[in-house]
């Protein structure tokens, strides 16, 4: 019944519908407002299915997206085909790795929304990704990204237990319900990352008709760790927030959101 497939093939298929139901994911307006205020072209590193990229393009802003997952980029291309020509013409994409991606363009705004930096598992990779962002910033340009603030109290608990996270009715078949469960598999507190399995279960009524799994590995950051990465990559903080409502980065913070500039 259960079929394990490559990471992001399943993600790509369910990504937009799954995250549309995630009530605490309130980042879209934040990034669109930022792009509107900035005015110029945008580079999105790890653009995925275009969840943020397309709404920015719909504002008449040109945007280039980079991602290393072909399944995610395929979903983006499918969505793009349904957009007006004016929007389509504002979007370009590259299949590339944000640790090594280089183009000959500089941008006034580079964004890395919804935690792709948490897919960088070593300090070397974390530095490389931030260097890619800094490399593509024009003079005075702005880099913005977010990561979650780790819940240290519960990080190492409940390993091996399944939790129902998200549930939705797929647009393609209203008679079904898909439930996404998360099972934490391991925690590496020294290297600050954890592994988990997403389990997607499709139900027809109460009957389980399909189960698909996908592995996940994520790093987590502390604030001083990020500050050290900024020092290493020639970036300095202009603004920092603890939520997408722009609340302070303090003891209440759920996210760590940074607005940065090149320090040289
Ligand atoms: C949580 S999604 C975020 C996608 C999009 N920014 C959004 O806000 O919906 C993380 C994305 O990072 C991409 N990713 C992970 N590691 C990457 C790498 N080394 N290079 C490029 N993309 C990467 C994944 O393919 C995925 O699309």
Image: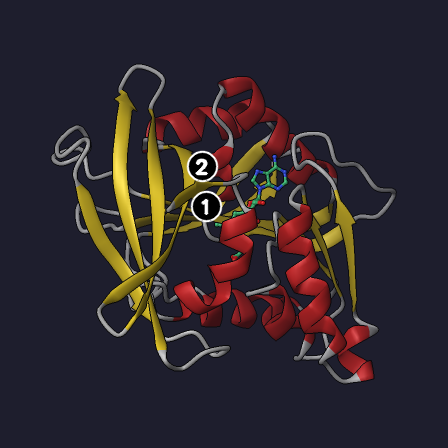
User: Which residue is at a point 55% across and 65% down the rendered structure image?
Assistant: 51
Along the line of sight, the residue nearer the viewer: 137 or 48: 48
Residue 110 shows in the view: no
- Badge 2: few (under 14), some or many (20 or more) residues near its Cα, within 10 Å? some
Which SS class for mark 2?
A: helix
Q: Any atom of ligand 1 within 8 Å of the CB at mark 1?
A: yes
- Residue 48: % across, % down: 59, 54
Q: Locate the C terminus and report the quarter of the image it occupies.
A: top right
Q: Which mark is residue 167?
A: none
Number of numbered callouts drawn: 2
| Residue at the limit of the structure toward the right, as seen here | 104
Alpha carbon distance from label 2 to label 1: 5 Å
- Please, which residue is most extreme toward the bottom here? 84
**Residue 194: x percent and y percent?**
32, 29
Residue 252 placed where, x, y %? 18, 51
Q: Where is mark 2, residue-wise?
A: 118
Pointer 1: what residue?
A: 115
Question: SS class of the residue under badge 1?
Answer: loop
Whether residue 19 is visible: yes
Q: Is residue 237 above or below residue 241?
A: above
Instruction: Examine the image and state in which quarter residue 185 appears.
Output: top left
Q: Nearer the viewer, residue 94 or 163?
A: 163
* Residue drawn at (73%, 36%) of the image: 135
Front-most of residues 131 and 99: 99
Residue 32 lies left or right of residue 256; in this view the side is: right
Pointers 2 and 1 in contact (CB under 8 A)? yes
Residue 263 is situated, as x and y percent measured from the top left of the image, at 61, 35
Kindly identify the residue that appears in the image at 43 percent across and 74 percent down. Answer: 170
Residue closest to the eye, 144 or 206: 206
Tell me: 50 left or right of 201. right
């Amino acid at each position: 019944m259960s079929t394990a497939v490559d990471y992001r093939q399943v993600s790509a298929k369910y990504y937009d519908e799954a995250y549309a139901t995630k009530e605490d994911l309130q980042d879209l307006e934040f990034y669109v407002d930022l792009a509107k205020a900035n005015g110029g072209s945008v580079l999105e590193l790890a653009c995925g299915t275009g969840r943020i990229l397309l709404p920015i393009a719909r504002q008449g802003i040109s945007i280039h997206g980079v991602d290393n997952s072909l399944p995610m980029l395929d979903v983006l291309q499918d969505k793009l085909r349904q957009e007006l020509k004016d929007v389509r013409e504002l979007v370009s994409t590259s299949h590339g790795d944000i640790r090594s991606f280089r183009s000959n363009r500089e941008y006034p705004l580079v964004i890395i929304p919804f935690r792709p930096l948490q897919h960088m598992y070593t300090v070397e990779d974390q530095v490389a990704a931030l260097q890619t962002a800094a490399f593509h910033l024009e003079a005075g340009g702005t880099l913005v990204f977010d990561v979650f603030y780790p819940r240290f109290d519960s990080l190492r608990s409940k390993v091996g237990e399944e939790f129902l996270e998200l549930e939705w009715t797929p647009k393609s078949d209203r008679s079904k319900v898909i439930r996404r469960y998360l099972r934490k598999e391991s925690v590496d507190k020294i290297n600050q990352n954890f592994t988990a399995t997403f389990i997607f279960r499709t139900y027809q009524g109460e009957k389980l008709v399909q189960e698909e799994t996908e592995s996940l590995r994520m790093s987590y950051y502390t604030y001083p760790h990020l500050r050290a990465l900024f020092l290493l990559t020639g970036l300095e903080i202009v603004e920092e927030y603890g939520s997408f409502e722009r609340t302070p980065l303090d003891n209440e913070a759920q996210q760590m959101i940074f607005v940065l500039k090149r320090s040289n």
